[in-house]
Image (cartoon, rainbow, N blue to C red):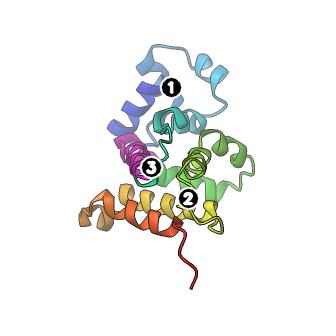
């Protein structure tokens, strides 16, 4: 069902990716879909954002290497054809729906805890303890979304290494003046 959802998103767009179309493509009854997912958007979210297992990056202690691997893995999720179709509409839906139940769900699939673990496991003295890890993650998330979805950013074609450098600079401890 998840693969059928991704295929339909790419082939027909979000509006045409209905529960009925997913059921027909995957050869199951619509009731089977509703037993597992409470809504079409929940199914689409799981199909597009499979959770941290796909962006799992075991920290090695080498901050630059781990950030690079993290950025590449996260960008791969956001850059998938199905994600490029779904993300703008899902974001618009979240803004207009006023749903307050999203935080627990998104934290369950968020790479935020993995990012924090990478920083905790880096060599001592590399990451400034005063840096707000949540802020750095938010900046990185915004940059990754832009790299995956905004045509003018995509067309620039800058290497990922530049984003890695900027992220590492935000995190580094600086000698006191």
Residue 68: x and y in percent read 39, 51
Of 22 and 100, the residue lying toward us: 100
Q: Which residue is mark 2?
A: 137
**Dot 2: what SS?**
helix
Q: Which residue is mark 3?
A: 62
Q: Is residue 53 magenta?
A: no
Decide whether the magenta segment is chiefly helix, strand or loop.
helix
**Dot 1: what SS?**
helix
Residue 15: x and y in percent read 46, 43
- Residue range in magenta is 65-86
Q: Which residue is mark 1?
A: 20
Vertical position of residue 26 compared to residue 177: above or below: above
Residue 154: x and y in percent read 29, 61
Vertical position of residue 171 compared to residue 35: above or below: below
Which of pointers 2 and 1 indicates the residue nearer the eye? 2
**Dot 3: what SS?**
loop
Q: Marks 1/3: CA distance? A: 47 Å
**Badge 2 or badge 1: first in the primary sequence:** 1
Q: Are marks 2 and 1 in contact (CB under 8 Å)?
A: no
């Amino acid at each position: 069902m998840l693969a059928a959802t991704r295929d339909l998103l790419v082939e027909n767009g979000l509006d045409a990716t209905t529960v009925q179309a997913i059921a027909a493509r995957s050869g199951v009854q619509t009731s089977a879909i509703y037993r597992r997912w409470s809504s079409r958007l929940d199914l689409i979210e799981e199909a597009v954002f499979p959770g941290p297992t796909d962006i799992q990056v075991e920290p090695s202690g080498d901050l630059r290497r781990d950030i690079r691997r993290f950025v590449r893995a996260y960008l791969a999720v956001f850059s998938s054809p199905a994600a490029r179709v779904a993300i703008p509409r899902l974001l618009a839906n979240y803004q207009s729906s006023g749903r307050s139940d999203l935080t627990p769900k998104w934290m369950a699939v968020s790479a935020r805890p993995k990012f924090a673990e990478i920083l905790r496991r880096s060599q001592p003295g590399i990451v400034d303890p005063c840096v707000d890890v949540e802020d750095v993650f938010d900046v990185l998330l915004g940059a990754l979304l832009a790299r995956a979805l905004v045509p003018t950013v995509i067309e620039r074609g800058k290497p990922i290494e530049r984003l890695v450098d900027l992220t590492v600079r935000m995190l580094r401890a600086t000698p006191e003046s």
